[in-house]
Image (cartoon, helix red, strand yellow):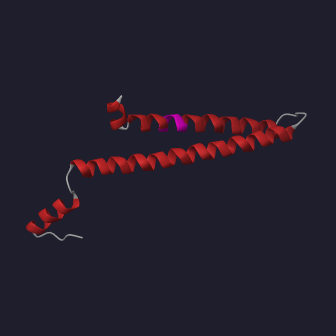
Amino acid sequence: MRRLARSGLWRWALLALLVAGACWAGNLTLFNWWAAGGPPTPQPEVYEQRGNLFFALTVALLLLALLLVVVNLRRSRAARTKIGGTGSTANSANAQSSGELVE
C-alpha cells in the first residue's frame, strides 16, 4: 500500500474518476436542458433547474481535475529534480566549463 501511495498512481486514478464523473454530469446536464426545451413537459422549469445544477457539478469536477493535473505535474517535476540532484546548477556548471552561454 505504501508503494502505491509513493508512486502517485492513486492521483492518476482519481483524475480518471473526476473526468469520468464530469462526463456523466455533462450528459445529465444536456439531457435536462433538452427535456426543459425539447418535448412538451408539464414542468419544464424543473428540468432547467436540474440542468443548471448538473452544469455547476460538471464545471466543479473539471476544475478539480485540472487542479489535480497541475498537482501531478508539479510533484513529478519535483521528484525528477530530487532524483537528478540539483538539476540547474549542475547543468550551468557543465555549460560554463564548455564555454556555453548560461541564462
Left/right placement of residue 58 relative to residue 76 reads: right
Asked where in the image residue 102 lies, by quadrant, the reply is: bottom left
Asked where in the image residue 101 lies, by quadrant, the reply is: bottom left
Residue extending furthest toward the front: 2
- Identify the residue at image location x=85%, y=41%: 45
Nearest the viewer among 100 and 12 is 12
- Identify the residue at image location x=33%, y=46%: 76
Q: Position of residue 23 (x, y in %)?
A: 59, 36
Nearest the viewer among 51 and 40 is 51
Residue 26 among those drawn in magenta: no
Quarter containing the C terminus: bottom left
Q: Position of residue 48 (x, y in %)?
A: 80, 42
Q: Position of residue 97 (x, y in %)?
A: 8, 67
Q: Position of residue 89 (x, y in %)?
A: 19, 62
> Magenta region, mostly helix, strand or loop?
helix
Residue extending furthest toward the right: 42
- Identify the residue at image location x=74%, y=44%: 52
As drawn, 28 above or below 69: above
Left/right placement of residue 54 relative to residue 37 reads: left
Left/right placement of residue 69 relative to residue 31 reads: left
How many numbered circles are shown?
0
Residue extending furthest toward the left: 97
- Identify the residue at image location x=36%, y=48%: 75
Quarter containing the N terminus: top left
Residue extending furthest toward the top: 1
Residue range corresponding to the magenta coloring: 15-19
